[in-house]
């Protein structure tokens, strides 16, 4: 019975997706290929007999990546580029060098690379300085090992670079429950506008609104299979049928949110918006208690935090909106997202009841795992069309996150993890 219901919902989901989609989608990138630069400062120590001593310096890099990276995708992204570096050995002896650098962004926040270059040292012990090096960077930090064969010295440097090694440097603002894959947040579905006409009436604001509402359509659309997956994983973990049913209903809500958001984008643009189908479920259910831990932690992060934030923001957007059609739409979305957040809390409570200490400890460990999201600044004028400014959004997100954390601490205090219900 349960299986038949799941199949029916999955077919419905796939059918709805296909009915409004085309295959020639052109998803927006979170990290566009091309040249990007950074600057840095470092300090270190060079080991080389009598030439041992403190080193410090400044550098500038120009790197090229030829691949665009989808929002939320993971994997290795190679880069190639050049480095201009000014070193000061033993505190004050300057050396200027130029190097060829190659490496890769290993995931969204770390990078590793190697370099080979030649420089010239000025002063008493100056002269030609070829060198090779290897480094690893994480966010703003970098740790590098250098070898200078002519000087017979091995150096170790630690430094800071701006901007950071984060490869997701914009465009990855996701509202509501994200769709997850085996290695993190799954790429967003594609969106393509056919017969694009532009937005003469509203100028730059119109273009911005098309971008924001298109991005919203993609994130809402991605939430639908996230909920279908939630329903399947809840069923496999032996959850009550009411939770499974509500997850399927939430998937329907998200399909509707995706469609109406795409309609708003189309309204501002004048073209026809096509959303890519995405009915697949990327992850297999986990076994036994591991499933409950995952369901609890993800419901906390994606529902109790993300969807509660989405609900509060949609409500605030409805209140500030002067466009009556968008206001009504945002009010409906706010109600649905609040129900999705409530579903997440119920999943957490169920998982705590049946999962025992492992679920309790995992939730406790993930209390601060998700920072409040920082929205892009869309300007004050966008508020009239249901889009909050970054400051207002940040205030709401901070409030919701701290309130949800307080509730979670309370829930965890009451359930000390020693009571486990057998199912
Ligand atoms: Fe939604
Ligand atoms: Fe939602």
Image (cartoon, helix red, strand yellow):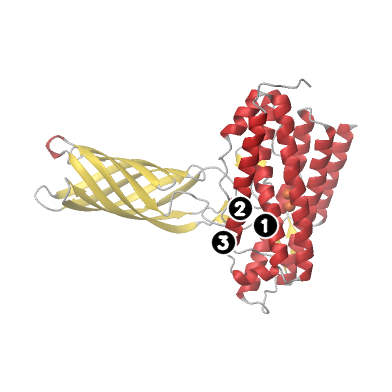
Q: In the image, is 61 to the left or to the right of 289? A: left
Tell me residue 131's x, y (percent): 25, 44
Secondary structure state at the residue bearing disc 1: helix
Instruction: Give the number of the disc on residue 391.
Output: 3
Tell me residue 86's x, y (percent): 25, 54
Secondary structure state at the residue bearing disc 2: helix
- In depth, the one of 123 and 109 nearer the eye is 109
Say whether marks 3 and 1 touch (CB < 8 Å).
Answer: no
Confirm if mark 1 falls within 8 A of ligand 1.
Answer: no
Residue name at image x 70 percent, y 35 percent: 348
Going from N to C along the chain, the mark reached first, 3 or 2, is 3
Tell me residue 137's x, y (percent): 40, 43
Q: Which residue is mark 2?
A: 397
Instruction: Give the number of the disc on residue 128.
Output: none
How many residues crowd mark 3 within 10 Å: few (<14), some (14–19), many (20+)? some
Which quarter of the figure has residue 318? bottom right
Kindly give the residue lying farthest to the right in the view shown: 1
Which quarter of the figure has residue 157? top left
Q: Relative to residue 117, is residue 298 depicted above or below? A: above
Confirm if mark 3 falls within 8 A of ligand 1.
Answer: no
Going from N to C along the chain, the mark reached first, 3 or 1, is 1
Residue name at image x 85 percent, y 42 percent: 9
- In depth, the one of 226 and 111 nearer the eye is 226
Q: Which residue is mark 1?
A: 313
Say whether marks 2 and 1 touch (CB < 8 Å).
Answer: yes
Confirm if mark 2 falls within 8 A of ligand 2.
Answer: no
How many residues crowd mark 1 within 10 Å: few (<14), some (14–19), many (20+)? many
**Label 3 to label 2, Cα distance in Å?**
10 Å
Secondary structure state at the residue bearing disc 3: helix
């Amino acid at each position: 019975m349960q299986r038949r219901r799941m199949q029916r919902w999955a077919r419905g989901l796939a059918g709805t997706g296909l009915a409004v989609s085309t295959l020639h989608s052109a998803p927006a990138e979170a990290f566009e290929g091309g040249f990007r630069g950074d600057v840095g400062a470092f300090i270190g120590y060079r080991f080389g007999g009598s030439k041992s001593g403190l080193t410090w310096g400044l550098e500038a890099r120009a790197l090229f990546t030829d691949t665009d990276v989808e929002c939320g995708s993971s994997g290795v992204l190679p880069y190639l580029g050049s480095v201009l570096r000014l070193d000061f050995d033993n505190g004050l002896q300057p050396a200027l060098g130029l190097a060829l650098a190659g490496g890769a962004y290993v995931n969204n926040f770390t990078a590793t690379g190697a370099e080979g270059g030649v420089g010239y040292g000025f002063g008493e012990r100056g002269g030609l300085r070829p060198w090779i090096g290897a480094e690893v960077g994480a966010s703003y930090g970098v740790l590098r090992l250098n070898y200078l064969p002519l000087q017979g010295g091995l150096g170790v440097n630690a430094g800071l670079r701006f901007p950071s090694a984060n490869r997701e440097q914009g465009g990855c603002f996701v509202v509501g429950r994200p769709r997850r894959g085996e290695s993190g947040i799954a790429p967003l579905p594609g969106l393509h506008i056919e017969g694009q006409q532009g937005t003469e009436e509203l100028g730059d604001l119109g273009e911005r609104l098309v971008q924001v509402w298109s991005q919203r359509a993609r994130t809402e659309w991605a939430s639908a299979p996230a909920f279908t997956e939630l329903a399947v994983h809840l069923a496999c973990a032996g959850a009550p049928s009411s939770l499974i049913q509500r997850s399927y209903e939430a998937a329907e809500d998200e399909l509707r949110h995706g469609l109406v958001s795409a309609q708003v984008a189309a309204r501002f643009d004048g073209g026809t918006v096509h959303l890519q189908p995405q009915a697949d479920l990327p992850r297999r259910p986990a076994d036994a208690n591991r499933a409950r831990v995952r369901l609890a932690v993800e419901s906390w992060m994606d529902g109790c935090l993300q969807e509660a934030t989405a609900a509060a923001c949609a409500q605030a957007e409805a209140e500030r909106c002067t466009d009556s059609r968008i206001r009504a739409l945002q009010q409906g979305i706010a109600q649905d997202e609040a129900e999705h957040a409530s579903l997440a809390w119920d999943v957490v409570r169920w998982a705590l009841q049946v999962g025992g200490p492992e679920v309790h400890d995992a939730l406790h460990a993930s209390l601060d795992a998700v920072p409040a999201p920082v929205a892009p600044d869309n300007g004050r004028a966008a508020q009239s069309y249901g889009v909050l400014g970054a400051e207002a959004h940040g205030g709401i997100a901070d409030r919701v996150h701290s309130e949800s954390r307080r509730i979670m601490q309370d829930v965890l205090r009451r359930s000390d993890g020693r009571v486990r219900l057998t199912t």
